[in-house]
Image (tube, grey):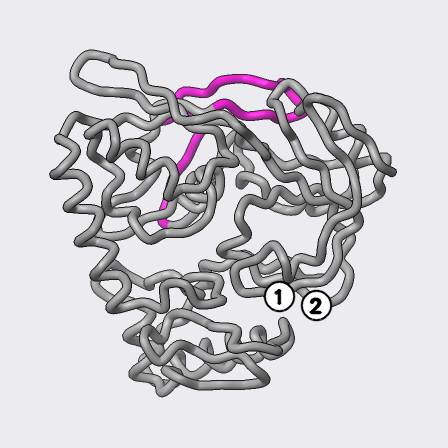
């Protein structure tokens, strides 16, 4: 089925290997591109007609997907909207569409001399993905910076939610809204995930030069320590505790540089799994299992995945 309006476009989906940072994944059933948030109300019926499970994708920077065809209907937010700013007392609120690349939000804030987001420099992905994962780096997390979210769920539909209320929950590298994770593939036909459409961040005036200087410093440090720009899905595992980084545990367990079938745990940061070319999801999952077992044997810690796995259960 192909379908196109001002608000929506429905058509064939490219393989997930073209849409994910780690360059893995087979072909979904179809793709729905949401051009305008007013089209969100049509999504459940369209997904049902297409016959797959809804799965929201941004820039695919933290997804490892199965190599075979998957029964997923991708939902992708496409927007030409830009970041807008509004003053609220000592705060300046920045409204950003979910489909906007996260670096574009940081650059817009820096151009306006607004601080608060600098620690997120170097994190790929979209604004929506950053909210869904409660992305964080250098002591900065997305959750505490949020003031409101515009979301869609079949019941009650399109609505704006103030963060910090019972309806939202942000924890380490995970976020929930209305009791559900954002955008996850639905567990069964007829169910629909919470779709994030816009996010409002609270920032503070800090001066353009100061904000840009901090962003450059954080990005330079990240490039020294992480394989920025490599074909990866970011950090594979969560840190078991604030003072126990997963990367250190993996290195101590001998997983740094470990390779299998075109996949390798980075020699720069053991927490990053990199596709060096010709890698497969099967090899990635086997390496991940090996890493969990190696760390358990060496230090007793049981690592929990930070990446999202889109595989058949």
From this viewpoint, is residue 169 visible?
yes
Q: Position of residue 2 (x, y in %)?
A: 84, 36
Marks 1,2: beta carbons within 8 A: yes
Secondary structure found at label 2: loop
In the foreground, 218 or 132: 218
In the foreground, 281 or 124: 124
What residue appears at the point 78 percent right and 53 percent down from the top-left corner?
Answer: 71
Does the segment drawn in magenta span residue 243?
no
Would you say 109 lies left or right of 178 here? left
Q: In which quarter of the view is residue 265 placed?
A: bottom left
What residue appears at the point 84 percent right and 42 percent down from the top-left corner?
Answer: 51
The residue that mark 1 highlights is: 24
What residue appears at the point 21 percent right and 29 percent down from the top-left corner?
Answer: 114
The residue that mark 2 highlights is: 67
Q: Position of residue 173 (x, y in %)?
A: 40, 50
What residue appears at the point 80 percent right and 49 percent down from the top-left corner?
Answer: 29
Secondary structure found at label 1: loop
The quarter in which the C terminus is drawn is bottom right
- Give the residues in magenta: 150-172
Would you say 271 lies left or right of 150 here? left
Compared to 167, does 74 lie above or below? Answer: below
Would you say 120 lies left or right of 46 here? left
Q: In which quarter of the view is residue 310 placed?
A: bottom right
């Amino acid at each position: 089925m192909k379908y196109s309006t001002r608000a929506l476009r429905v058509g064939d989906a490219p393989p997930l290997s073209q849409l994910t940072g780690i360059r893995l994944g087979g072909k979904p059933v179809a793709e729905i591109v949401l051009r305008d948030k007013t089209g969100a109300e049509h999504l459940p019926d369209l997904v049902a007609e297409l016959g797959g499970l809804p799965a929201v994708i941004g820039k695919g920077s933290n997804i490892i997907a199965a190599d075979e065809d998957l029964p997923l209907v991708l939902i992708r937010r496409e927007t030409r909207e830009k970041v807008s700013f509004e003053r609220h007392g000592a705060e300046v609120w920045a409204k950003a569409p979910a489909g906007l690349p996260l670096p574009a939000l940081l650059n817009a804030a820096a151009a306006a001399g607004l601080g608060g987001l600098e620690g997120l420099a170097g994190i790929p992905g979209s604004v929506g993905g950053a909210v869904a994962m409660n992305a964080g780096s250098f002591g900065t997390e997305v959750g505490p910076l949020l003031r409101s979210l515009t979301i869609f769920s079949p019941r009650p539909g399109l609505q704006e939610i103030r963060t910090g209320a019972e309806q939202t929950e942000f924890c380490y590298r995970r976020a929930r809204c209305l009791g559900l994770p954002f955008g996850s593939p639905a567990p069964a036909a007829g169910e629909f995930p919470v779709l994030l459409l816009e996010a409002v961040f609270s920032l503070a005036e800090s001066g353009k030069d100061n904000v840009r200087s901090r962003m450059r410093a954080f990005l330079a440090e990240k490039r020294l320590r992480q394989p920025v720009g490599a074909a990866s899905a970011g950090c594979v595992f969560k840190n078991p505790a604030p003072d126990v980084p997963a990367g250190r545990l993996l290195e101590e367990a001998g997983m740094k540089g470990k390779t299998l079938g075109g996949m390798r745990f980075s020699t720069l940061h053991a927490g990053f799994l990199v596709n060096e070319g010709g890698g497969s999801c099967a090899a990635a999952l086997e390496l991940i299992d090996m890493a969990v077992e190696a760390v358990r044997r060496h230090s007793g810690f049981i690592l929990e995945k930070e990446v999202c796995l889109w595989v058949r259960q």
